[in-house]
Image: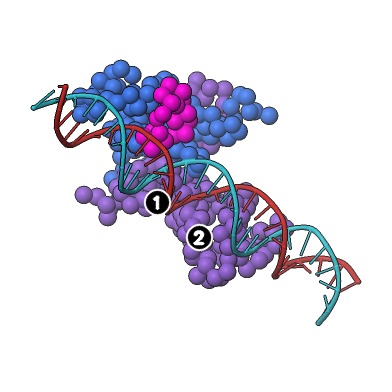
Chain colours: A blue, B purple, C red, D cyan
Amino acid sequence: MNDLLERLRERGWRLTSQRRVVAEVLDGEHVHLTADEVHARATARLPEISRATVYNTLGELVALGEVLEVATDGRARRYDPNAHRAHQHLVCSGCGAIRDVHPHGDPLAALPAAERFGFTVTAAEVTYRGLCPDCRP
Amino acid sequence: MNDLLERLRERGWRLTSQRRVVAEVLDGEHVHLTADEVHARATARLPEISRATVYNTLGELVALGEVLEVATDGRARRYDPNAHRAHQHLVCSGCGAIRDVHPHGDPLAALPAAERFGFTVTAAEVTYRGLCPDCRP
DNA sequence: TCCTAACTTGGACTTTGTCCAAGTCAATAC
DNA sequence: GTATTGACTTGGACAAAGTCCAAGTTAGGA
């Protein structure tokens, strides 16, 4: 995480306490917080941080490629700090829990040229859906 | 499309002009409208149809398995009437255009048991991202 | 230690979606 | 055909998620 802040500073990011707190909140494995959750946790450490700043900072981290934005449920976007290792998502249809997973093979390879409609295809996001152990009937 | 309305009536759906219009608007290939777009097009045919009814009807069609809900952009959900043939989505990062595509192989098969975290995995949604011919630089 | 462009703030606003009480109507029965 | 009734629709209020902006604050270089 310190690496992250260092990397960003080298890229001309001004290192404010707000940005530091957002980066800290997003640290870890299998972290997929909504902007609101990030704001709630950031507020615990820095009570006066505003929603706008959280949104701004998340947007910047996404633009810089340090955080991934995932839309697994059609509701709030979630932010995934695990941007430097390619992975996909496994989502529980019951409780919404999300895990990072690593399927074998390159999902992109499965799309034949004839199915690309002239697009230059650069990425494939896979969302696996099912029930987690706690939600299984 | 008449098949759809017939099928729904057999399942006890009351066939109102509002529902008919929503079903008509959703007819076709590569159709991925937002609720708002459905409402706009429905209004052109039936001016007094309300937003609430469009949302209700879309929700019912999804629950009945006749329409798929897709969340490709973290903004408005989109509705895909092509629910009876398994497919995935190809999304243009430039303009947001969406195509239905049919990769070969079963994407589910690529997720090893060791990566399933005890989940009962039942589906895999793949979103391919790239630039469409019109958006390519 | 000063300066200034970059950053943050709070609040207003927009978009997307949900909920509800009251009114309307499709389909069945007669 | 007409009556009946429960299912459907409506508009408006509300909620959640996200954007925008003018004014105030501050990190980091000079």
Please, what secondary structure does the residue beneath circle 2 have?
helix
Label 2 sits on residue: B38
The residue positioned 37% from the left and 47% from the top of the image is B91
Answer left or right for A50 relative to B43. Answer: left
Q: Which residues are magenta?
A: A35-55
Q: Nearer the viewer, mark 1 or mark 2?
A: 2
Of callouts 1 and 2, the N-terminal one:
2
Q: Could you say which is closer to the camera, residue D29 or residue A110?
A: D29
**What is the quadrant of the N terminus of chain B in the image?**
bottom right
Chain under callout 1: B
Q: Position of residue D11 (x, y in %)?
A: 59, 63
The residue positioned 66% from the left and 59% from the top of the image is B7
- Was residue A42 drawn as part of the magenta stretch in this picture? yes
Q: Which corner quadrant of the image does residue B52 belong to?
A: bottom right
Q: Main secondary structure of the magenta part?
A: helix
**Contact? badges 1 and 2 (CB < 8 Å):** no
Label 1 sits on residue: B98
Q: Is residue C25 above or below residue C21?
A: below
| Mark 1 and mark 2: Cα distance apart in space | 16 Å
Answer left or right for C11 relative to B5. Answer: left
Please, what secondary structure does the residue beneath circle 1 have?
strand
Which residue in the rendered view is the most extreme toward the top?
A2
Q: Could you say which is closer to the camera, residue A87 or residue A77?
A: A77
